[in-house]
Image (cartoon, coloured by chain):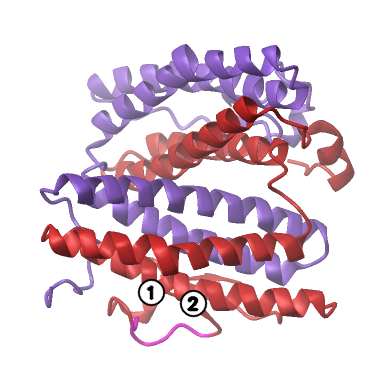
Amino acid sequence: MGDAFKNTPPKPEKLGAMTEESLKAAFAGESQASQKYLAFAAKADDEGYPNIGRLFRAVAHAERMHARNHLSVLGGIAGTADNLKAAWGGETFEIDEMYPAYDAIAKLQGAAEASTSIRYAATAERDHQVIYDSTAEGLGAGNDLGATPIRVCPICGHTVIGDAPDECPVCGTAGQYFDTF
Amino acid sequence: MDTLSVEELERRLPHADELHAMDLADLKAAFAGESQAAEKYLVFAEKAEAEGLPNVANLFRAISFAETRHARNHLRVMAGVNATADNLQTAFEGESFEIDQMYPAYVEVAKLQGDKQAFKSMHWALKAEMDHKRMYAEARETVLAGGDVAAQTVHVCTVCGHTVIGDAPDKCPVCAAAGSAYRAFA
């Protein structure tokens, strides 16, 4: 493995089945660590530890590099047209299968907070599915998406192209708090 | 755009709940799914940028952010966000697991199967987790003693994830990327 340390991100390669399993699990682990550290950073900021907030954000970024590298080796980074299709497929699975099943269980078990968290996510995934679909169609016709700002609700993740609504239709948060991309 | 106050966030966001085993299993799986979607979309954004599609890149980044909100909400319901001293301990334990168990096993499998790129990706991650473990341990000590950590810039190698507190090195000691490849968290 002497040539393994050149200064380029790892590339896709033909993988043994067990290595592929390992990389998938490692991608899942790094992704969750990155997201967890971002939530911990916000908490540290709230508690008056801005420098620990920064440490968590920096390490989240490092985990993000690991996640990207693992995904690259897995051959998970294609051209944008295919990436949009993969993204659409993921959203569709969550909308049709995953969240309805989880929501039914949360209701059965009377878990109100879990039900809220699941409903917020499931509702936003429908926005994402529609947006990915129309974007893929535009790209198929040779067009980038328009340069319109995209707004995201900081509470529930509701996503709109264009102006933020006065009030989030999913969770009721005022539009002035939406994050702009 | 305004920012919600801490109190308002607390009022509006889902809270930790007493969960049955199946709900907990679901939320764990949903947290895993949202986390992976958020990270994947950021990589797809870089790719769209490289292909000259800045607006598709912007879309991927925005939706990634939405998935980050979902991941945070699920984590809160599972009581996964606690006081910072406890969060540092959780982070320390996660890094320890990766260093002691997960990556050594995966590195061996990659060697056994002769998968060089996989080996490289695992090896780089393992190296960085060792830095993270030490930083989290030190930060926890500082918090327990009643302080924040010092206000120093943290640098992260954008190729392999090597992490240093203070100045970036001339060359990454793990992957040999130039110091200019580091991203600063100031």
Per the picture, the main secondary structure of the magenta-coloured stretch is loop
Q: Which chain is purple?
A: A
The picture places residue B45, in percent across and down from the top left corner, at 38, 43
Determine which residue is flagged by label 1.
Answer: B127
> Which hue belongs to chain B?
red
Q: Is residue A119 magenta?
A: no
Determine which residue is flagged by label 2.
Answer: B131
Disc 2 is placed on an element classified as helix
- Kind of residue sitting beneath label 1: Lys
In the displayed structure, would residue B141 be above or below residue B30?
Answer: below
Is residue A133 left or right of B108 when viewed as pictured?
right
Q: Which residue is found at the position 62% from the left and 16% from the top?
A: A105
Q: CA distance from mark 2 to mark 1?
A: 7 Å
In the displayed structure, would residue B26 be above or below residue A16?
Answer: above
Q: Nearer the viewer, residue B68 or B92?
A: B92
Identify the residue at the far front of this view: B21
* Range drawn in magenta: B167-173
Q: Which residue is found at the position 38% from the left and 66% from the top?
A: B158
Dot 2 and dot 1 residues touching (CB under 8 Å): yes
The picture places residue B3, in percent across and down from the top left corner, at 78, 44
